[in-house]
Amino acid sequence: MDILEVKKLWSDVKSELRETIPAHAFYSWVDALEPAGYDDNTFSLLTVHMMAPQIVRHSYYSQMSSAFEKILGKKVDFSIDYDAALAEKYKKEKKKESSRPKSLNKDSEEDSKTMDNLAQMQSFSNLNLKYKFENFVVGENNRFAHAVAFAVAQNPAKKYNPLFIYGASGLGKTHLMQAIGHYIIFNKPKLKVKYIKTEEYVNELIKNLQYGGERNARMEKFRQKYRNIDVLLIDDIQFLESKTYTMEEIFHTFDSLYNNNKQIVITSDRLPKDIPTLPDRLRTRFEMGIIVDITPPDFETRVAILKNLAEVRCMDAPFDALEYIANNYVNNVRELEGAFNKVSAYADIEKTPLTLELARRVLNCEASKKELTIEMVANAVSEYYGVTVSDFLSSSRNQKVSGARHIAVYLARELTGKSFENIAEFFKKKHPTMLYSYEKIKDDIKVNKDIERAVNDITNSLRS
Ligand code: ADP
Ligand code: MG
């Protein structure tokens, strides 16, 4: 088959997969797969990540199979092979891309993606339909956040303003925030609700600024769009870029809404004081209302979340199977859901009941995935760089030690789900020092191939 046709097919399959594979896995493993051919009922793909063939096959086989089946109209096999030459090319391109301004990577279609209000979002996007209070499971980890969010939904701009929700990735921040939106649309349809992802807001703003002649008119329109609403939901504010104009704009939007008694809800993966690019006058505003956190769910809550999922899908799932899944996915609800989805997909495909044995068999590779501790991460990094963990804990400023220490801190934060406080405690350092290391490596990865490779190698060794 013509490679252009193959590419087109793969692009359609990918759109399917974007809906069914958890975002983190999709962007890590699936997005960069390159179609190579479609012959003999087998779709061939190449990858630039050594681990991808194994991970995609083991974890997302059924999603891949169904996506191919849906697009190609029949069951087909697929193969994924690692391609070293492609890996080189990919790394070069990635480097080029990261040095290009972000706004140029987005096209005008992005605009239409930021929906005008949640009512539209409700009808247009399946993904968000499920983010309601009704299917948000309340546990000790989110009880307070949930109570405050519900109070805000019942009395927008009357009680807690702004509401700032923070917590690690995959713990339900977006879900809770959108639940507020759905509730208000349903119960107070006159109120105008708007949900925005910070990154999209920033991109849209930058694009407007880049237009020549009509710039003022455009900016005025942009401003009105965000100020002429009753409830503004801003997701993942940690992505706010430190560009002065962006800060200025969001600052004025905030004040305009706040002074007109409109509700503002913000989410972030950390506290306002831990977002290094956030200027003080914005930080104080974010801290003006109420700040609530969501932590990883305890065992009981994880089981309850799984039970809820089983119920929603009308599946019989015995307690021991749910217990097994809950025991193996502790830090991230998105991954917990992913594991359940995989087991239930197998049950569907094989037309067998969902049992403990099935869960064990299906999740085998993931279940052996150990939960990583800060110590394990520190050990792996020290081995990689030929230094010792006690070097990390010392105050040594030796270049080799401090370079490796930055990476250990970065990976500890990325891989363990522990807070900066916990990490600071382990490394016997101050909290801001840990933040500095984290942000440094996060930036360095984008421009320094060696650091990128080291981070990937260590991550793979820890996860294998
Ligand atoms: P975050 O925004 O914190 O990264 P999300 O809100 O996207 O996390 O949640 C990740 C997934 O986990 C979503 O599918 C969400 O519905 C689910 N989820 C998280 N917390 C809960 C909960 N308490 N009850 C039910 N589902 C939850
Ligand atoms: Mg989110």
Image (cartoon, rainbow, N blue to C red):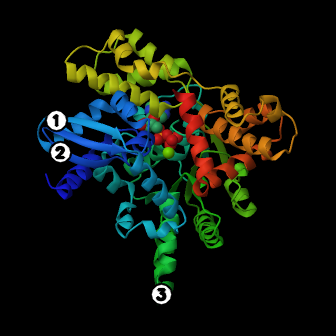
Looking at marks 2 and 3 on the same chain, the residue that comes earlier in the sequence is marked by 2
Residue under the image location 39 percent in, 20 percent down: 363
Instruction: Answer left or right for 442 relative to 194.
Output: right
Find residue 56 and report its horizontal and vertical position in percent.
Answer: 36, 34
Residue 302 seen anywhere in this rendered image of the structure: yes
Q: 42 or 218: nearer the eye? A: 42
Type of amino acid at the residue the image marks with label 1: Val
Residue 212: which disc?
A: 3
Q: Are marks 1 and 3 in contact (CB under 8 Å)?
A: no
Give the secondary structure at mark 1.
Answer: loop
Find residue 77 and report its horizontal and vertical position in percent.
Answer: 20, 34
Find residue 81 and report its horizontal and vertical position in percent.
Answer: 33, 39
Residue under the image location 51 percent in, 37 percent down: 170
Residue 38: which disc?
A: 2
Residue 389: which disc?
A: none
Residue that mark 1 sits on: 76
Distance from disc 2 to disc 3, alpha carbons, whole Å, reads 46 Å
Type of amino acid at the residue the image marks with label 2: Tyr
Q: Nearer the viewer, mark 2 or mark 3?
A: 2
